[in-house]
Image (cartoon, coloured by chain):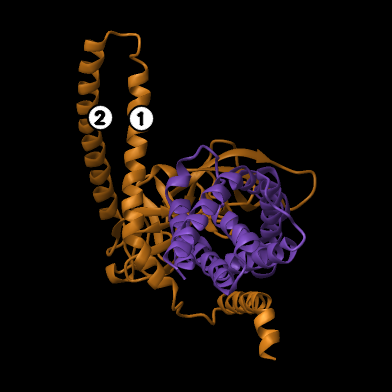
Chain colours: A orange, B purple
Amino acid sequence: MLAFLRKNQVLLSSGFCLLLSLYILTAAARGHLKQDPVGPILLWLMRPLQIAAQAATGWIKEIDQRYATVAGFRTENDRLRKRIQELEVERNKLLEAQATNQHLQQLLEFRSHLPSGSITASIIGNSASSWFQSCLLDKGSADGIRKGMAVVTPLGVVGQVVSTTSRSAKVLLITDANSGVDVLVQRTRARGIVSGSLENVTIMKYVKRSEDIQEGDRLITSGLDGVFPKGLMVGTAVKVRKQSLGLFQYVEVMPAVSSAQIEEVLVVGGEPSQAKN
Amino acid sequence: MKLSLLFFAVGMLLVLLQTTFLHLLPLGPVVPDLILVLCVYWGLYYPNVAAVLGSFALGYSVDVVSSPILGLNAFAMSLVFLIVYLSSRSIWLHNPLISAIVVFLASLVKGAALVLVWAVFLSMEGLWTGAARYIIMEALVAAFLAPFVFGLLRRGQSYLEQIRVTTE
């Protein structure tokens, strides 16, 4: 018996891991897995590394941008190039400081229009898989972030918190195939659900054929999903098609916020109410 | 033991890379799946219980940082390991091109496992058309990177084994 176990230990342990993952999947899907025992520890261990890596990523981006800037001056003589480089570095610093200042001011102003208890957070990591559109925030339940809270920027809706640990939170972006935001067409008040898809396009679903919707129409949150305050920008309709069959129109949406370009977000707390902007 | 720890550290480093630096690559929405390449390497060259647990743990880590539901990637990575392990008995692998092909096929297996589990536990809408694109792109990127990652891992493994032999 022992010899059999020893001989087939890889097969048996693989089978065990497969069954365990299926058990975890089933429990998580049915909502029986209230508390993930390992996830918070893992995120806690990875958090400082991710913050450092994200800082390094920003540094690499800056180097890349600086290189692109400098590359334009190759034909100029060395003295001028050096001088320009110095000025460019200084200018970049000032511009960065100005942009950060402006961005934070916008966030502050925007925050005053949102329900009380909104929390400012930074994005410290992106999805590790091509299949999911998510990101990690540097704040968690210890800072007041709870599952189900809305994540927004002054430009529009980013996503929804799907899980938290004490010091981090996972956000499912609106471009993920499993997300859904109840929206209104600002011009006609037609309703629908904006969701991502695996085809890498964001679409507005369940828009009746009879509804008037045109390319360029702005889509805002309806506030009816109980997650996002009413009146926040979600995106713009970029392709509208009435198929020959079916009850609904096909509406492709350009999200107002590109997750790749944002660094700070607001996590909206309190009861969702109408945004004043 | 030292080798298992090294491999686990490499795995965690790959999770970190996949959530940060690899997003800088101009590959659109596709994130190179180096964790899959590592699981394939384990299945081929390092098939033991530690590697089984390692594959499961790395899949679970991906679930923790990005998946909306726990267990998806843990299942997929465990399955990839098992299939590569079973097929490794009939594969004689010393050629970078063949390692790329094995990783390409393993990535297809992972994609199929994800689609299957996704269909059962998450939404079905637009799954097939979208998934097919992701599966092919991910498999191509992983296959392209496989020979380099395999080379690095093999060097690390033989270096540690050499140290062990010298100390013994």
Is label 2 in contact with label 1 (beta carbons under 8 Å)?
yes
Chain on which label 2 sits: A
Front-lying residue, B36 or B66: B36
- What numbered label is drawn on residue A92? 2
Residue A202, image x, y percentages = 58, 47
The residue nearer to you, when weighing A270 against A12, is: A12
Q: Is residue B164 left or right of residue A274?
A: right
Amino acid of disc 2:
Asn
Q: Is residue A125 left or right of residue A52?
A: right
- Can you see residue A210? no
User: Measured from the top left, where is residue A23 in percent x and y?
Assistant: 61, 79
* Neighbour tally class for label 2: few under 14, some 14-19, many 20 plus, Cα within 10 Å: some
Q: Which mark is residue A75?
A: none
| Residue that sits furthest to the right in the current view | A245
Residue assigned mark 1? A65
**Image quadrant where residue A201 sits:** top right
**Left of A275 or right of it: where is A15?**
right
Query: Which residue lies most toward the bottom here?
Result: A1
The answer to whether residue A194 is seen in the rendering is: yes
Which residue is drawn at the image coordinates 73% and 54% (left, top)?
Answer: B92
Dots 2 and 1 on the same chain? yes
State which quadrant residue A103 falls in: top left
Q: Quadrant of residue B79?
A: bottom right
Label 1 lies in what chain?
Answer: A
Residue in front for this viewpoint, A211 or A14: A14
Q: Which is nearer the N-term, disc 2 or disc 1?
A: 1
Residue depicted at 67% across the width and 85% down the height: A5
